[in-house]
Amino acid sequence: MTVVVALLTIATGLSAAHGAVDTGVIRLAEPTSPPDAESALRQDLDPLADARRGFDVRAFDSRLESLWFQRKAYQTQGREQDADHQAELIRDFVAEEGVRRLEVPAGALVLEARAWMGEGNYDKALAALALAESIDPGRPQIAVARAHVLWASKAGIVASGTELLRAIRGTATHAVRDLSVLHRSAVVAVAAFALAIGLFSFFMVLRHQVALRHDVEEWFVAGGGETWAKAGGWAVLLFPFVIWIGAGWAAMWGIVATFRYMRRGERVLAMTLLAAATLLVPAYRFGVGLFGLAADPTVRTTIAAANGGYDPDRIVKLRELVDAHPDDPMYRFLLAGLYKNGRYFEEAFEEYKRVLQASPSTYQARINLGNIYFLLGQYGEAISNYRKALEIRPDAALAYYDMYLAQSDSFKLKEAAESLSRAKELDPARTNRLLTLGSRDGGGPKVVDAVIDFESIWRATLEGRHLRDWLDGAPSERGWSSAFRGAGNPLTVLAALSLLACGFLALAFRGRAPATRCVRCGRPFCTMCRSGRDGHEYCTQCVHLFVLGDGLAPETKSSKLYEVERHEAWQRRGRRLAAVIVPGASHLLSGRAWIGCTLVTLWLLALIGGFPQVLAPFERLFGTGFQAAALRPGPLPDAFGFDATVLLAVPLALVVWIAGNLGLRGARRA
């Protein structure tokens, strides 16, 4: 009895301190009219409800700024001992507050270290990096900066090399942990594949253009246009550039124009590439969305807040987003969720109320407010908030489910049964799953918060929308079909038409052999200019010289042998040069299409991934605005940057280059 009286006395005292009169039951006052922005509610919370004061970001920032600028002032005055003491105070304060990672101050210290290194003061540079390491541990950028300082100070190759190896290890660890390399590779792969299609078309044109022009010239001659024969052949080959209407489709035209002259393997590969090209734009959108999940600090913070528990680090980062986007209720909604996960109910309550002030249609905030009342045992207020959520969103199964629990605990069993039945009608699978998840004392179900899911974050990032759209009262779109909208884009339509054109050519010219090039001298010929008894891939002169052996006139033979030698020399030099620049080009030029295209794609993947600036000329030429050089996820500032993708790109490029050029040597020996 004494304990009960004491508890009632405490509760009454807390109520009186805020000017409210109660009988020991905690009440979070629900205003009858929408409050203005300055009337932030502060409620009396019973210690038995485990309500605590949360992490005060503004007080933390204020104290940190004070220590920071005092340190800078001491450095300016030359009081190094006092500056070092302030650095120790910063370390102790951050550790005491439980904040493990401060990326922005650490980045500022990296810039400070670079400035000291430029002045030749290596001790101060190392001190700045040591402080940066203590407030942002494991940051690879710091190890790279320290390696530069040690090398510049002539500390030795061992010391600087050790730091560089540490940076490489840390970079690889971070890349695996946050999947940044994988996410960036999705965008790079799309760009590499698009360029691979273009290079495949280019090398097919180089390989078959002589035969193509020969057929066109023969067609002009047969029609009486011998004067225009050669010009007509070149005009057909360079048709996209002749009319100059969307010359970017030249790659598709090259594949279609040379399709009839390709071997069977080349044709299969060409149709495969065209079919894949129809998906390039959806794949690009997919890759950009995937890259955004890893590269955008805002998205990373949003994901961490949406899927993680209470943590001072998350509070600091999310508070920065709240201050940077005061008109966006989404970030404040996530901040409230972090406070609630830490059982800081007063802060959570205030943030949810601010969300409702900014966006009254946010039914999710109403559900979560009801859950706070539920956890405090105020079932009537909880049910009231659930009903308000249902007024905004009548098909909110979660509101019915949470209301069912509140009505059950307040012994409104008939109403509880109706709420549960309604929840099962709206979303039976989820309701049954929630009922089986026992997490309260005794194993019973608990109220569940409305939280933003990963799919919603992904879809918003992919479609370039604001996450605040998730907070409206309209039903959310289900499925992944929204990621593949825009199938009517010009590239998809053009690739599909090119694919149909290739099929049409295969049927229209079935049974009619196209022109080809002599494998010895390179001269083109067709059925109209070669004897019917010649069944080899040789022109008539080469058949007599190398197959029949019946001889030619001495002058003709000498001229032919010179022609053969010159053709083979140019072929050999051209393939060698092409393989040096683009490994796999030699395979494409010699008819080994699949392995050649694979090597070309891998080479482009490594080249663009490690050195995306190589795409700049193509971006300016086609006006794509792709800006691949900006695809470098990492901490800011970019001083002493170390790209994890280079760790994979350089070895891959080396292996592909060796494979492409060793294959060329083998082909020449054969």
Image (cartoon, rainbow, N blue to C red):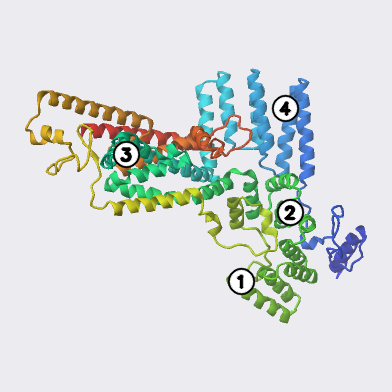
> Of the residues shown, which amino acid type is indicated by label 3?
Leu
653 shown above or below 307: above
Q: Single out the residue that lies furthest toward the front.
A: 224
Q: Reading the chain from its start, which is encountered first: label 1 or label 2? A: 2
**Camera-side mark, 1 or 4:** 1
> What separation in Å lies between label 3 and label 4 (alpha carbons)?
64 Å
> Of the residues shown, which amino acid type is indicated by label 4?
Asp
**In this picture, residue 422 sits left or right of residue 55:** left
Which residue, given by chain and number where applicable, does mark 3 sit on? 588
**Camera-side mark, 3 or 2:** 3
- Residue 1: quadrant of the picture: bottom right
User: Residue 179: image x %, image y %?
Assistant: 53, 46
Q: Reading the chain from its start, which is encountered first: label 3 or label 4? A: 4
Which residue, given by chain and number where applicable, does mark 4 sit on? 84
Q: Which mark is residue 329?
A: 2
For the C terminus, the image quarter is top left
Pointer 1 with pointer 2, Cβ within 8 A:
no
**Camera-side mark, 4 or 2:** 2
> What separation in Å lies between label 4 and label 2 (alpha carbons)?
41 Å
Pointer 3 with pointer 1, Cβ within 8 A:
no
Q: Nearer the viewer, residue 604 or 341?
A: 604
> Of the residues shown, which amino acid type is indicated by label 2?
Pro
Pointer 1 with pointer 4, Cβ within 8 A:
no
> What separation in Å lies between label 1 and label 4 (alpha carbons)?
60 Å
- Residue 350: quadrant of the picture: bottom right
Task: Check disc 3 and report its element: helix, strand or loop.
Answer: helix
Task: Check disc 4 and report its element: helix, strand or loop.
Answer: helix
369 shown above or below 491: below
